[in-house]
Each structure stands twice: as structure tokens, then as C-alpha cells.
Image (cartoon, rainbow, N blue to C red):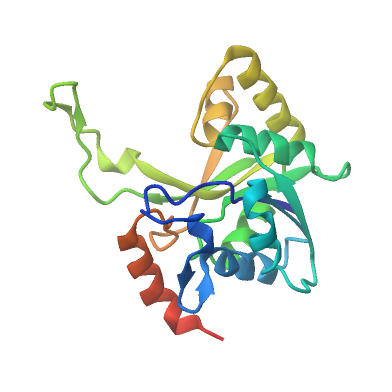
Amino acid sequence: MHLLIAAAGSGSRMGADRNKLLLKVAGKTVLEWTLKAALASNAINWIGIIGQPKDKSSICSILNDSVKSVEWINGGSTRQQSVQLGLSALPDDAQSVLIHDGARCLVSPLVFDEIAKIVSNGQAVIAASQVTDTIKKVDKNGEIIDSPPRSDLWSAQTPQAFPVDKLKHAHREAIAKEWNVTDDASLFERLGIPVKIYDAGPSNIKVTTPFDLVIAESLLSTTKD
């Protein structure tokens, strides 16, 4: 199974002076923790890291002697463009692909394995967790206009997995129709292609803010080598 790790972001919302994936948490960089989980997955045998050229030397220096194939891919100016470039760099024999945000460093190898199993049957699938807060939809004046039932709401995560041919088609459609989305599942939704939910639980957080680093530090400190 093939995995693309999106690592082309910045540290702007973190208030950092570098790519947030290069920040240390519990003794390792955020990206090292993500890679550790991916490399421990029984299903993953090829990994592509999509990053900005300025981060290439720093990121490649942490790869060391991986027992699995890990390749560098230059990313674009947006996440969507970066995934498009990642898809172009997949080996010709890739039939399914998992896409994972490098900032989700608390992901478990089991999540990769289970999602890989589902997509191998031709079903698009994303990791997610059911919303526990009451969500309010508000208008431009900040006034509540609706409270959707929590039973219908899930928080999208990664990894997300898709048949390669369908995902490439979806990205071609996005370019032609100038769609801008924040995750690949949104492209399938617009095309009417079913996407399944896999409950990965609430711990699979994305490290985006300093508070997230504190949470990740607390959880990962118990799994240090």
C-alpha cells in the first residue's frame, strides 16, 4: 500500500519560525512521530513525503535508514496542489493511496492498517471522530441560525484513502472547475462518489496550535523509546 504524507505546511498558526513538523515534542520532531507510526504499519510499503524545497534537507535528515521506501516530493503552494504533485509521483503500480497530514503525529499503526484494508476493496474511506460538542451554525452577524444534531456530525481526520484512478480524476475535475477544498474527501463528495467513515477516535488530533503541542507531549511521552 502507498502512503503520501503532506508535510508542506508552515508554522504560522503555531507561531513558530519553521515548519511545525520540525518542532520537537516528547524528544522527537512531530514528523518523526508520524513516520514512526507509518513505518510500523503492516500495510504500508511505500511512503512519499510532500514538502517544501526549503525543508528538504531538514526532513530528509530524519529519515535515516528506513526499512521501507521513503521518497521526497516537492510540494505546491496549497495542500491541494501538493496532493496533486504527490499523486503524479506515485509508482505506476499504485492502485490505492492513503493521504495523511504529517501534523497528525498521534495516529496509530492500526489506523493505517484498517483504512488500508477498506480501500483495498475499492471503497474510499477517511478517519474521523464523532463530534461531542454541540455545534452552532451562525450567520455573518454572529447570531445562531441552526444547531445540527450531533449524531450526524463527524470531525474529518487523516489518513484518507482512495482508489488512485478515481482520486486523480477528482483532482483533474478540481483543476478544470477551479474547486478549492481542504481535504480530498470533499472532491469525492462533489462528484457524488461515496466515502466511508472509519472511527479513529478523538486522540488522532492535528498539531496546529501551541496547546496541541502540550496535548501531544503528554500523550507521546508515555511511548518514548
- Is residue 179 rendered to the left or right of residue 152? right
x then y, percent, for residue 139? 18, 22
| Residue 59 image position (x, y, % from top left) | 65, 61
Q: Would residue 151 appear left or right of 71 to someone viewing this image?
A: left
In the rendered view, tell whether residue 52 sits above or below residue 138. below
- Dividing the picture into quarters, in which one does residue 204 lie? bottom left
Left or right, 221 with respect to 89, comes to left
Decide if residue 159 is in sight here: yes
Outermost top residue: 177
The residue under the point 52% across, 47% down is 9
Q: State the residue in front, 75 or 108.
A: 75
Return the residue found at the far right.
92
Instruction: State how many labels appear.
Output: 0
Q: Residue at x 53, y 62 (%)?
A: 22
Give whichever of 89, 200 is nearer the camera: 89
Q: Is residue 1 visible?
A: no
Q: Position of residue 192 (x, y in %)?
A: 57, 22
Residue 108 position, x and y percent, is 55, 67
Q: Which residue does the image show at 35% across and 55% down from the upper left?
A: 209
Classify 64 as above or below 148: below
The quadrant the C terminus occupies is bottom right
In the shown orientation, is residue 217 left or right of residue 125? left
Q: Is residue 109 above or below residue 21?
A: below
- Identify which residue, 128 or 179, lies in the foreground: 179
In the picture as drawn, the residue positioned furthest to the bottom comes out as 225
Quadrant of the drawing holding the N terminus: bottom right
Residue drawn at x 54%, y 41% is 196
